[in-house]
Amino acid sequence: MRLVNVRPDRGTALFLAILPFALVILAYVLGSAERLSANPDDKLLPSLVSLGDAIIKVAFTADARTGDYLLWTDTLASLERLFSALAISTAIALLVGVLVGMLPIVRSFLAPFVAMVSMVPPLALLPILFIVMGLGEASKIALITIGITPYLIRDLAMRVEELPREQMIKAQTLGASTWQMALRVVLPQILPRLMDGLRLSLGPAFLFLIAAEAIASDSGLGYRIFLVRRYLAMDVILPYVAWITLLAVAMDFALVRARRFFFPWFGAAK
């Protein structure tokens, strides 16, 4: 039997899914034990006990100076910036993407510009944003928005262009205006694709968020990571990295569940 035809059962699939995580944890435990046996003061790979103590300190112990629970304060600050940028990006991408995909005149006008902007490295614009917009929240939100909006626009525009032409012709035959075709024909079909596009944008969005917070911020997950790195506090950095990953996974899962709930036909259509 060819490997391409081999499908694991549910138990095997679950085991295979867990195995890479278990191997990474095992490798970390063994590496940490080896380094700590040679140097008990080693900070590069702290023990699991040290990691647990650090998690308790940042998540469940009030900071002596501010009285805040640092992990939750940083998480709230970062998610406010992230959600604001995602909301702005989604609104812009939905409007511009539909127009570019539907209207040839708008496509000729905006498609080359959007394609060019999408090639600009967003992190290279960070100093410019700080100079023009200052070091406040606006520049951080703008960086995330600039980083993911062009991609979302191009993705949605291509999805609109892929819709069967027959649908547009039938809608026009029934007397639909351009506005009605956008609302009744195009929009319902691209909304689930927009949610998939947002899923793929989460990684870059977190990257731009952490970069902006690391350079100029007084709160946030990226700020905390780059603050404690000067002390080589890997027992704080590693839990923060794991927490950021869990947040991204949770958001991805939520988008998948929302798409299945609101657009159950989409999976079957694919």
Image (cartoon, rainbow, N blue to C red):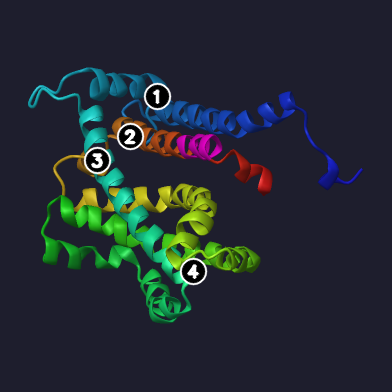
Among the two numbered marks 1 and 4 on one chain, the one whose residue lies closer to the N terminus? 1
Which residue is found at the position 37% from the left and 18% from the top? 49
Task: State how far apart marks 1 and 4 are (Cα).
Answer: 53 Å
User: Whole-percent x and y of residue 43?
Assistant: 32, 33
**Type of residue at label 3?**
Glu
The answer, for residue 80, to whether it is visible in the render is: yes
Residue 134 lies left or right of residue 144; in this view the side is left
Residue designated by label 2: 240
The answer, for residue 42, to whether it is visible in the render is: no
Q: Secondary structure at mark 4?
A: helix
Residue designated by label 4: 101
In the rendering, which numbered label is found on residue 47? 1
User: Whole-percent x and y of residue 259?
Assistant: 52, 40
Query: Quarter of the image containing the N terminus?
Result: top right
**Type of residue at label 1?**
Ser
Q: Residues within 10 Å of mark 2 (few under 14, many from 20)?
A: many
Task: State how far apart marks 3 and 1 are (Cα).
Answer: 32 Å
User: Whole-percent x and y of residue 135?
Assistant: 12, 55
Task: State how far apart marks 2 and 3 are (Cα).
Answer: 17 Å
Q: Nearer the viewer, residue 185 or 199?
A: 185
Pointer 1 and pointer 4: residues touching (CB < 8 Å)? no
Pointer 4 and pointer 2: residues touching (CB < 8 Å)? no
User: Whole-percent x and y of residue 113?
Assistant: 37, 77
Q: Nearer the viewer, mark 3 or mark 4?
A: 4
